[in-house]
Amino acid sequence: MVLLSMILLPVLVAPFAWIGEKVNRDFPKYLSLAVGIFLAFCTAYLIVKYPGNGFAFEEFYRIYPPFDFNLHLAVDGISLVLLAIVAFLAITVTLSSWHVERPGAYFFLILIFLGPMVGVFVSLNLLWFFIFWEFTLVPMFFHIGIWGAENRIYAAMKFFIYTHLASIFLLLGIIVLYLSTHTFEFGKILNIHLDPSVAKLVWILMFIGFAVKMPVVPFHTWLPDAHVQAPSPISVFLAGLLLKMGAYGLLRWEIFLFPQTSKFFAPLMAFIAVLTIFYAGFRALAEDHIKRMVAYSSINHMGFVLLGLSALTAAGISAAVYEMVGHALVISLLFMIAGYIHHKTHTWYISELGGIMKKIPGLMTMFVIGVLAAVGLPGTAGFVGELTVMLAAFDYYGWIMVIVPLASALGAGFFMWMLQRAVFGPLREEFKNLATLKELPLVENIPLAMYIAAFIIVGIVPAVVFNLYNPVINTFAQLFQ
Amino acid sequence: MEKLVFLTYLTIGIFFAGSILAFLVGKFTQRWNSFWVAAFTGLAGFLLTCFIALNLGEHPVVHKFNWFTFGSFKVPLGIYVDSLAVVMALIATGIGFLDIVFSKGYMEDDESPHRYYFEKLFFIGSMVGLVFVSNLVGLYIFWEGVGLCSYLLIGYWYWKKSAAEAALKAFVMTRFGDVFMLAGIIVAWVLLGTINFQELNALALAGAFSVKLGLIISVLIFIGAVGKSAQFPLFPWLLDAMEGPTTVSALIHAATMVNAGVYLVARMFPFFDYSHALIVVGFVGALSAFIAATGALAHTEIKKILAFSTMEHLALMFVALGVGSAAAGIFHLMNHAIFKALLFLAAGAVIHMAHHQKDAFKLGGLYRYMPQTALLFLVGILALAGVPPFNGFFSKDWILAATYAYGNPIIFGLTFVAAVLCIAYGFRLWFVVFTGEPSEYSKKAKEAYPVMLVPMYVLAVLTVVIPFFKEKIIHFLFGEVHEPFFINLLVATLTVMFILFGIVFLIYYKRVISTAKFLAHPLGRGINDFLYNGWYVDAAIKWLCRHVFYGSIAKAIEWVDIHVVDGAVNGTAKLSLACWDRCRKMQTGDVIDYLTYFVAGVLVLTLIILFV
């Protein structure tokens, strides 16, 4: 019942956020915070009780057995890590949205987003996975379309149509798979030997769906637009959770299900991954828009995730999952602060900023810490993620992967250059008397401090993450031999 | 043994704990209270290191643990404290402590001493960690840690445009070297199965892998060392790093961090030796030494002359390692750390007291106003120039002898020229700053405070005392070492140095020869600018970044991204809109049109059915 309640409770209480606004303007945010804490407690409970290997806490609800349309929920180490991110971001995003306009509708949408989000990570039925997957789109669409910046309608439409079109490929893949296996059950598909050509067709169709969501080059252009227009807390959901669905789906429903086919396509994945890493890195270097730069760096990191996954070894997959955690924590911080910079200075452009460290040292110190984590400084999650992915990739592919570390210099290049131009240096004249350029209120500082604390802890003691799923991945990795 | 393991971890930890404490104390009580925390931490760390050094027996202190496991990889961390590590740590903590004390005077006008001491202690902690760790990943962690502190401290006055730019250059340029090193670490880890220094060296001694593989790994790792130790071509950041407070230059960019590259090569000496990589080290060192020594001769800012000089001496250490004499290299590292810290602190005193005038030629006659500083500076110059009986003489002469014995004429030639030029640029600097007519800046100067003088006296005494313990130190570090000695080389060196001193004396003290004529000539001006700008390596790197990486590649990808990749996406939308528009126009409401479509449709269908 724990898993089901984690999915249903946020959705069921969501209408109260909307109604409650009429009674008390503060009610919706406290409700959302309570749900976040509830999710955190449930996740903590699951982590403590998790036996260490395999699926646990299975729940099975018959819905329409003739089509194998049953709600089958369970978690393993990998899902647990992602659930922890969901719960963590639910709390931080709520705190970051403390002073949002129209809180009723806003938190209503957040709550109905969280339920399906949990569902995606715990469903063992492919059809339900797809249903949850599609459900997350709707609240996100309205968030961008209503609370977004000037060009929000274009971005919301592009986001919705693009990712929805990708989902159609995913659905096609699911249908083809069902027609040849007559089941949506993870466990059953795992044991059915598919015809290789069918498996390849299914793999490619589903991969398109996941690749757009991750996103990887050349399917990435919806992401910078969506991020730039989305309000910052929603950017956090977008980068921290929505993108992870793509990587998680690829891992759970392709790599684990079709190990041999994945092996066939591994070089393709690796090629796309390396292309993404360098392409996004150079693209970010040319970017003047601060949030867009962070968005491209996010794509660059997702390239690392894909590279880890493409090395079909226990090491590669563990590294990729770790990198997902690191990415969620680091990029969330950077998106939040990029949003605050715009909010305080009324400009997005690095060339129009300068020297704001002098006015808001507290916030900018956090920004510098976030940037350092993003460029992979040891002591943060960024370093462990990059190191482990690079190691696994070199281990699997050999000498060709010796070029990947060079991308890290690129990351240092564009991020540190941005800091020098936007944050350090002399304070620009027009900012000297700008009333809005001041430090954040305490409540909005809390989530930022939480991100920093989390990525430093995870960076210094990576075992807290790795130990959760090492046995699971080691078991699955035997499939590739 | 157990106790020493604990004390080693404690030494590393005390600096990190101290750094946070210094920040908090400074933030929430009186700001300058952070100084007392820092001084106490520095002293405690130094005493702990001394204790470890004194109790270090025949066997090194070793401890190892598993940091984390992923897949089939176990990531180990641990410590390995031998005499080399402990000497490096003594330099870092000892000079670090003196520097902390000196800063009390130098940074007196500073608004945020708690930030300063936080970064400083964090740096010393990382440096101590760097020399104590037992494997490449551990080294890389602290290597980046010292790099971070260097970045933060160069940009300490971040509101100055030049400081922000210098910090950026330092970070990116050293990072560029570091990623090659990271690649080297990954290659070694996967293909050799270990990253532990001792195991790597043991594999090399056993000849367990091909020389070619070893060479690739060594060169990749050496590129990291080149970046950190400011060798050709990754040196321009060190000159710009002089934007930071002078105390930072003294500790980080002269005495400790920049030595990390030399230390790394020394640590992996058998590995480099087996892989035939030492010749690369030697050539890079010799070339860098030449560029730096001639650059120092042409430059006019006090700190940049010293920066060029630092680069030169690091290069000499690399040459020593390259020609196979690790003992000479490390001995010089130690001597250089002492006399260069002294020189930088003295330069800091001059700059601070002369109202932040850094151009040597705008000072002058300072001997009259700050005689103690002048004499201390002179001691530094004598040691730097390698004049007996100061410590620089013993190690530099050894390096020259080892290079001579090695027999490569190019390496020896460049090294010899660089080594003897020290006396020329050293005394040029001293004469220009401390003798002659006082300028308006000099007239305002007064003697440095006691809190600044005392650390300088300690260092000055060390430059004289160290030579007496030369045998002991070398024995402690390397056991029995054969030191080559050539009397004719020694005589030649000293003669050339004497002649150079004479020339400089005539130009800059007696001022009977003028360089104005040389500089007025276009060729002379050109040569001077070429040397002054470090062979325009900085300009070349800037051009590469601005016009190739940013201007060409990044801009081209941006264009492709907007017009091709996203263009295709938006193109699909336009295409479907256009289709919709065309289809809409078919709905004319005219019965004849509809009938035409109907007949055409029937025709097409019939044809398909008939022929397919």
Image (spheres, coloured by chain):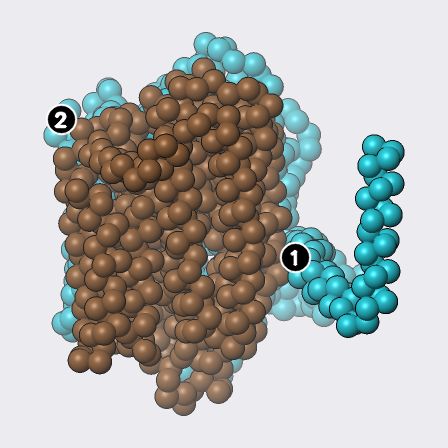
Chain colours: A brown, B cyan
Disc assigned to residue B2: 2
- Which of these two is toward me, B82 or A343? A343
Q: Where residue B208 sits in the image (x, y, percent)? A: 48, 11
The image shows residue B194, relative to residue B302, as above or below, that is above
Q: Chain of mark 1?
A: B
Label 2 crowding class (10 Å Cα cut-off): few <14, some 14-19, many 20+? few
Q: Are marks 2 and 1 in contact (CB under 8 Å)?
A: no
Image quadrant assignment for residue B544: bottom right
The image shows residue A204, relative to residue B147, as above or below, that is above
User: Does any portion of residue A390 appear in the rendered image?
Assistant: no
Amino acid beneath label 2: Glu
User: Does any portion of residue A298 appear in the rendered image?
Assistant: yes
- Which of these two is toward me, B320 or A28? A28
SS at circle 2:
helix
Amino acid beneath label 1: Val
Label 1 crowding class (10 Å Cα cut-off): few <14, some 14-19, many 20+? some
Q: Where residue A105 sits in the image (x, y, percent)? A: 32, 72
Q: Where residue B35 sits in the image (x, y, percent)? A: 21, 64
Which residue in the structure is indicated by mark 1? B569
Disc assigned to residue B557: none
Residue at (86%, 35%) from the top-left corner? Answer: B610
The residue most toward the left is B3
- Which of these two is toward me, B612 or A116? B612
SS at circle 1:
helix
Residue at (50%, 26%) from the top-left corner? Answer: A180
Work out whether mark 2 precedes mark 1 in sequence or the reverse, and give the earlier one. 2
Q: Where residue B273 sits in the image (x, y, percent)? A: 52, 21
